Amino acid sequence: MKLITAIIREDMLDQVREALIQAEITRITVSRVSGHGRQVEERIHRGEKIVPDLIPKVRLEIAVNDSFVDITCNAILESAGKNGNGESYIGSGKIFVTPLEECIRIRTKERGSAAI
Amino acid sequence: MEINRTIALRHIRNWFGLLAFIATVMPNTAWASENKPIDSGATAWMLTSTALVLLMVPGLAMFYGGLVRTKNVIGTMMHSFAAMGIMSVLWIICGYAMCFGPNVFGGWLGWNTEYLFLKGIDQTILDAGVPEYVFAMFQGKFAIITPALIAGAFAERVTFKGYCIFIALWGLLVYNPLCHWVWAPDGFLFNMGAAGAIDFAGGTVVHISAGISGLVAALFIGARRGFPKTAMLPNNLVMTMMGAGLLWVGWFGFNAGSSIASGLSTAQALTATQAAAASGALAWMIIESWHQGKATALGFASGILAGLVAVTPAAGVVQPAGALLLGAFASGFCYLAINIKNRLGYDDSLDVFGIHGVGGIVGAILLSFFIRDGWMADAAKAAGGSWSVWQQLSVQAVAVLLAIGYAASVTFVLVFLIHKLFGFRNDTQSEMAGLDHSFHGERGYGMLNAG
């Protein structure tokens, strides 16, 4: 089992969700986070340009069985990388894949792969 | 508006009479002079009404702002606020001259050069005892809120520049002529039938024209990306409820202020307004509870609006029982219209046509059945004997159809040209990133983990 954590642009969430659902990955957790990478995003405040220290992003957490790792990662890679005009640019985010020791479904107390 | 009605010269029914009429009164206005005493009661109420109608615009910004997605909240609120800037400036420059000057171009518009920059009304007191500045500013507020209403139909998907150009041209070419036809003393709808097409505070001018224009624009620029598959839920219903509340309060200025007086007609309009808003809200709540099993807050707010929209043309002529029925009918028809819209699948995002268009039509037509006897008696006298509900109904229907036909066709030409020349619909990238980031460089809620 693996835990896939993806940090993506806010405005890519709809597209990534659509791609994941297409790949039959429907069990996910989404949270709004902010962070700092290489991207610089200007905002305007009373006529001055301001660069915030932290930029809002969306974090997806998806627990999968090993055979689904590539499917999930590919779905995210293909949907989260390009903006509406088909260009790729800095700030598209990252995917982290980490080993997952245990997974327990609270309602049934099932454990392991069956619970995912 | 009532004051126009009492002083307009009723015998002017034909083109030649009209020409003679204009010749005699130019360059002065038909119904104002410089030496009238100020009626401080009426003036105080009209000042209050002017402020109340302006209050509806931030109310509308909150109502619409809460209904869109988080990434579009600022852009959507700016649609209302931008109208306060653009339409006010245009109104002072030439809007008042186009609406309340004497007929030109065969009555398509009014025009009075004296009214440019309002310079000719600096010392004028209306026959109602109200300084003409107050009347001009009160009317100007209507010119702000009408295009702001349209913005809900194409919410979340237009460029800010295209929107600004659209409302400026729409105000000049759709609002001003309609306003002139319905409310100027020599407007042809004002003088149609025995005692004019009844549009007390703007059923045709404001709500039907905004509703139908929104529908045309929404159909022309197409649905939002992902509609209807992706759920597009309100970001802040609390703000929407506060906005609906402000609209209700502001509507007392809108309707009761349209009496241009502080007296009996004001009280009649005020009472009808409260009755229709309340019964509209209640009717929507009951219908929705029966149909969906739950009474939603947005449904209640929509019912308030449907009732208020329907009573807008009628506030001067219906009694409380009629207003209660009008509000309830409006909610029923609007609820039905929105259900049909959902099946047809076009994207009138915030239901401008479903509420303002349908509610306005329901109000303007059905009011014929609830007119108080005194008004009908006066109309019969003016018509020289008898005047029936059905005759008034036909006058109302003609006014509604004209407003629909005119607003729809001019709006279509406008959105087509603006989209070709300046880009009205935004591109996919700016739509995905949201109006706030793409056109304003800001975010609505906080700088960090905003919801």
Image: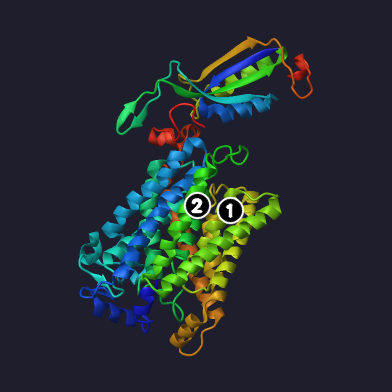
Q: Is residue A73 left or right of residue B190?
A: right
* Residue at (51% x, 66% y) in the render: B311
> Mark number for residue B119?
none
Query: Which colour scheme appears in the figure?
Result: rainbow
Relative depth, front residue between B137 and A78: B137
Q: Residue furthest bottom?
A: B385
Question: In the rendered view of the protein, which quadrant contains the N terminus of chain B?
Answer: bottom left
User: Which quadrant of the figure has residue B354?
Assistant: bottom right
Q: How many marks?
A: 2
| Residue B399 in the image, given as x and y percentages of width and height | 48, 70
> Mark number for residue B300?
1
- Chain of the residue under the numbered disc 2 shown in the image: B
Residue under numbered circle 2: B244
The 10 Å Cα crowd at callout 2, few under 14, some 14 to 19, many 20 or more, is many
User: Both on one chain, marks 2 and 1?
Assistant: yes
Residue A14 in view, yes or no: yes
Pointers 2 and 1 in contact (CB under 8 A)?
yes
- Please tell me whether residue B10 is drawn above or below residue A109 in the rendered image: below
| Residue B229 in the image, given as x and y percentages of width and height | 63, 38
| Residue B111 in the image, given as x and y percentages of width and height | 29, 67
Q: Secondary structure at mark 2?
A: helix
Q: Secondary structure at mark 1?
A: helix
| Residue B259 in the image, given as x and y percentages of width and height | 39, 70
- Please tell me whether residue B63 is drawn above or below residue B139 in the rendered image: above
Q: Is residue B393 left or right of residue B89?
A: right
For badge 1, the amino acid type reads Phe
Q: Earlier in the sequence, mark 2 or mark 1?
A: 2
